[in-house]
Image (cartoon, helix red, strand yellow):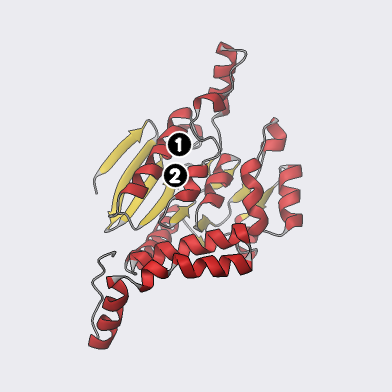
Amino acid sequence: MNAETIAEGLVLAEVAPGVLEVRIDRPQARNALSVAVFNGLSSVWKRINKDKSVQVVILTSADCGTFCAGMDLKEAAAIRRDDATADITDRIEDPFQQGMRTVNVPIIAAMTGSFTAGGMMLALNCDLRVGLRGTLGGIAEAKVGRGSPWGVPLLWMLPQAVLMEMTLTGDFLPIERLHALGFVNHVAETPDEVRTVALQMATKIAANAPLSVRAGKKSIQHAGSVGVEQGLRDAVDIYATVYASEDAQEGMRAFAEKRAPRWQGR
C-alpha cells in the first residue's frame, strides 16, 4: 500500500482496487482541521474528480478517540493574535468543504472516534457513514461562538427537532442514536472494525458498474435539492448515459453468460 502525503497531517493511500483512503493524520491535535488539511482536502476532491481509476473514497483518521474535532481552534487563535483583523477562514480555500459535495464517486466516512463541528461537517458531506460504538457526534459551534451553515443539509438527514437541539444546545448525541435515526449506516466495535466495514462497503461499490454508481449518487443528491417530482424528471436525464453505455450491454451479457462483468466505464 503506497501512501502519499498531500499536506502535513493528510495522507492518501489506495487500500483496494479503485478504493482511495483519505486519512487525516493529526492524532496529537485530535485530528483537528488545520489550514493545511483544509486546503489539502480541497485539492484531493478536485483530483478525484479527474481520476477515473478512483471508484470509491474512504475518509478516516488516525486513532486517538476522535474522528475529527473540527477546526483547529489553537491555530485560529494564533492567526488572530498575529493579525487582529484576520480570521482563519481567510486562509482556507473552502472552509465549509462544499467541493466535497461535488465529488462524483461515493465517499464513506470511517469514523473511528467522536466527531463535532468540522468533524460533523465532514461526516454529513459523506454519502455513507460507519461509526464506533460508544462515541458521540455533535455540532459545538454555539459553544465557541462560531457558526454551522454547513449543517443545513442535515435537515434532510435528521428530524428537525433533533437538528435544532444539536445546533442550539451544542450537546452531542451517542453514535447509537445517530444510527437509530438513520444518519449512520453501521456501528462497529473497534477502530479497525470501523475501517474494515467501510472497506467491505467500498469493495462492493467498486465492483459495480461505475457509471451506474455515479449516476445513482448524483440523482439522489440532486433530488434532495430540487424535490421529488423535478428530481424524478431529472434522474431520467442523469441516467440516460448509463442506458446508452457499453457497460449496460456488458452487464446483460455477463448475466446471460453467468460470469462476472468486465466494466469499461463507458
Q: Amino acid at mark 1?
A: Pro
258 vs 223, left or right, is left
Label 1 Cα neighbours within 10 Å, binned few <14 / some 14-19 / many ≥20: some
Classify residue 71 by image quadrant: top right
* Residue 246 circle label: none
For the point 54% across and 59% down, the residue is 222
Asked if marks 1 and 2 touch (Cβ < 8 Å), the reply is yes
Q: Is residue 14 above or below residue 43?
A: below
91 vs 161, left or right, is left
Q: Is residue 4 above or below residue 152?
A: above
Q: Secondary structure at mark 1?
A: helix
Classify residue 253 by image quadrant: bottom left
* Residue 195 appears in the picture as rendered: yes
For the point 55% across and 69% down, the residue is 233
Classify residue 170 by image quadrant: top right
Task: Judge by depth and name the residue closer to the eye, 203 or 153.
Answer: 153
Reading the chain from its start, which is encountered first: label 1 or label 2? 1
108 vs 96, left or right, is left
Task: Judge by depth and name the residue closer to the eye, 216 or 60.
Answer: 216
Q: Position of residue 11 (x, y in %)?
A: 35, 40
* Residue 27 circle label: 1
Q: Position of residue 20 (x, y in %)?
A: 33, 51
Q: Is residue 73 above or below residue 184?
A: above
* Residue 112 appears in the picture as rendered: no
* Residue 63 circle label: 2
The C terminus lies in which quarter of the figure?
bottom left
Q: Position of residue 88 (x, y in %)?
A: 55, 25
Q: Position of residue 32 (x, y in %)?
A: 51, 35
Q: Amino acid at mark 2?
A: Asp
For the point 43% across and 50% down, the residue is 103
